[in-house]
Image (cartoon, rainbow, N blue to C red):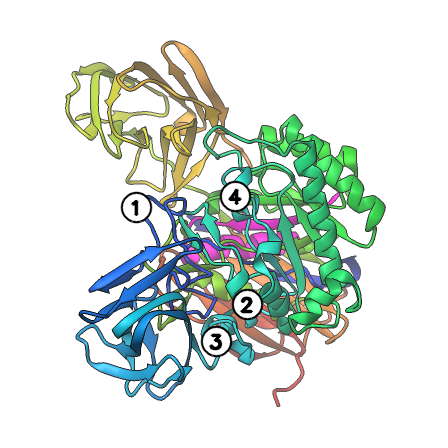
Amino acid sequence: MSTHQDSVVRITVDESDAVAINPGMWGVFFEDINTSADGGLYAELIRNRDFGFTERDAPGWGPLTGWTTKGAVRPSGTPVRVELDGRDAPASVTNHGFDGIAVREGEPLILELGFEVMDGDPTLVVTLHDANGAVLAEGSAADGRLTPSDGCADARLTIAVTDGTVAVSWVSLFPEHTWRGDPNGLRSDLGDVIAALRPRFVRFPGGCVAHGLGLDNVYRWKNTIGPVRDRVGDSNLWGYHQSMGLGYFEYFRFCEQLGAEPLPVLAAGVCCQNTPGGQTAFDDEQLAAYIGDIRDLIAWANAPADSRWGAVRAAAGHPEPFGLRYLGIGNEDEQSPAFRSRFGEILAVLRAEHPEIIVIGTVGPFPSGSDYETGWAIARELAVPIVDEHSYKAPKWYFQNLDRFDRYDRSGPKVYVGEYGSRGNTMLCALAEAAYMMAMERNGDVVHLASYAPLLAKVGNTQWEPDLVYFDNERVLPSLNYWVQQMHANAAGDRALSVDVAGTPQWQRRRSERSRFSVRAASGTLTVEDVSVEDATGRRTVHGAASVQLYQAPDDAHGVDVTHRARVRLEGGQDGFVVAFGDDDSDLSYEWHFGTWQEKFLVLGYVADGLYDEWTEPIPFTWPRGHEFDLEIIVRDAGRHIICSIDGEIVHDVQEDPSPEERFAATAIRDAASGRTVVRVVNATGEPVDLVVRWPGGGEPQQMRVTELSAPAGAGRPFEPAPRLPAQRVEAGSRTRVAAYSFSVIDLDPEPAA
């Protein structure tokens, strides 16, 4: 709830007191997750175009995944070719694209086939048709072009052979009109929606994708350049195949067209710690070869065209150097001795041989905890120029941490907040991110770069939610979070100005003294028994039930101090089980997770405003199925202090961060290039707020242009477009009213509209 201590909020902007910030702070992070490369930003329309899918990509996958066959068809050889034997009867293969092939009437498609005649005098016909077989376009292998006679969201491509045998090795279908017209290019509407963010840098090709699921899955940039047919695809640790059609050349070219700095991320000599068996590191010989690849990358990007690697770049059509300055080494890595050793060796080589390259390190997957602390210690010890911090947290955490970077050491490494997101696409989530971005910008002497993650997600093909932009084969669906990013990017600056805010509305979270106990499993069978609760009414005991996936205690506890006890056993199933307590009808309750991250960890979390967030650092935890746990949960001070025990041993003893949730925030920036002074305001309370903006000494702007995004706190959800868009108005004078649950960008004394 919120209460207004003053009828008007007065914001005083002092341009004489400023902190220099990086005008290139805001960028984007592209990772091949959620089918965002093949089937997404990369414009290729054929799935498994080289018949290269394998069991390594996903269980049951093979050369004909994505294809259906008719007649005598069989894959053979390495690399795979698919033989269509049409001597006795027609033989055909049909590709269904990525959830269908979306085509538009009259918009040409470029067809490319690789095949060899094996026997006879075959006729090969290529047909583009709808799901019912109605022909949209037809051609031969020699045509190289198909122009649909009608639009279709779910077209298919069929290659049919008669009177002979043909071995097909390659089938590609590309829109003629790609983003900026590049061959082997990008989907136009997705390129446009990213360009509209005006990113000053692009991080690629991914986070976890870069260090891979095992050392044999580490992303190899050399496999992604050169002729497209020669590139080496690989499994993607998110559970599918990456063709590498969207490779390093295309990433660098995309950055160039956007006017953005390229920021490639490479493994730090170790693989992802979530690999079965855990993190492993390159041995000395492997590391030496890998460091050689890093040297070659810098040469490929920056060396002149008459050098060895510059010539490779030039042969691809780009004789001028790309001008690489940033290089990320590592992503969310466990800060182990092996990581410290391998990262340190890579850093030492780059520092000695390429002092012009700014290395960005990593401090683990979380914004706090043991990896974070160790990562920062390593970064300080090695004098890493910039470190990459990640924070996927609920809005509650962001509103409580708007002063986070105020407390950072100004003499230590700079910060790149490379991945952040508030776990939802609601307006409240977007406002939490807007406020956190303002806090980063206000601390521009510490925070050098920032990018939301993940960027793209294909509807029906996601491994992670929420995301910034959703899409399917025909539509692009930017979220409320996206519009917050765009509003920031369109008003970037080079100085953060001092701001004094008087009359700030106060907000305080309501707490419930009701506690409901339940246990749920995603699968398997739960036995819950000897359930008891102690509260102000005394002790009650309820016998549990067997053979259930959800157990709900029939009685609730009441009071600021309660104790829950139960014996729990899980038979079979996956993903462990969750013990929930507190008032799940309120906007703050609690969940104790047994078996997170592939059933490896134990963690206590809370559910605030309907969104789950970890409260404790994950604790390594495995157990045999059928083990009985005696659980005790002691809740004190209405949930501000919680103690959890297993079999009589305390595993969590945590107290809530007492910091208030700052639901109203204001900052200001100045941009020397444009001459703009901009005030940003987040009002995440349920009431509108009247503002007056002024300068020290009492001067006031004569006019203000206000761009405002507002919606109810719970509006917005994944896979849907933002329910509201930013709206603009001009105020004569220095007063305006910002709506409840709104983000406003206010230009002071703007130039008259053209």
- Residues tagged 4 and 2 counted as in contact (Cβ below 8 A): no
Q: Which residue is mark 4?
A: 217
How far apart, in angstroms, are the residues tagged by discs 1 and 2? 41 Å
Q: Is residue 6 something one can see in this rendering?
A: no
Q: Which mark is residue 461?
A: none
Q: Amino acid at mark 2?
A: Gln
Residue at which label 3 appears: 188
Looking at this view, is 405 or 69 the one in front?
Answer: 69
Q: Quadrant of residue 412?
A: top right
**Does residue 346 lie above or below 436 as drawn?**
above
Residue 343, horizontal then vertical, whole percent: 70, 37
The residue type indicated by label 1 comes to Gly
291 inside magenta stretch: no
- Give the labeled residue for mark 1: 60
Tell me which numbered mark, 3 or 2, is placed earlier along the sequence: 3
Q: Is residue 604 above or below residue 133?
A: above
Q: Which sits earlier in the primary sequence, circle 4 or circle 3?
A: 3
Residue topped by disc 2: 486
Which residues make up the magenta segment?
A: 413-440
Q: Is residue 642 shown left or right of residue 514?
A: right
Label 3 sits on what residue type? Ser
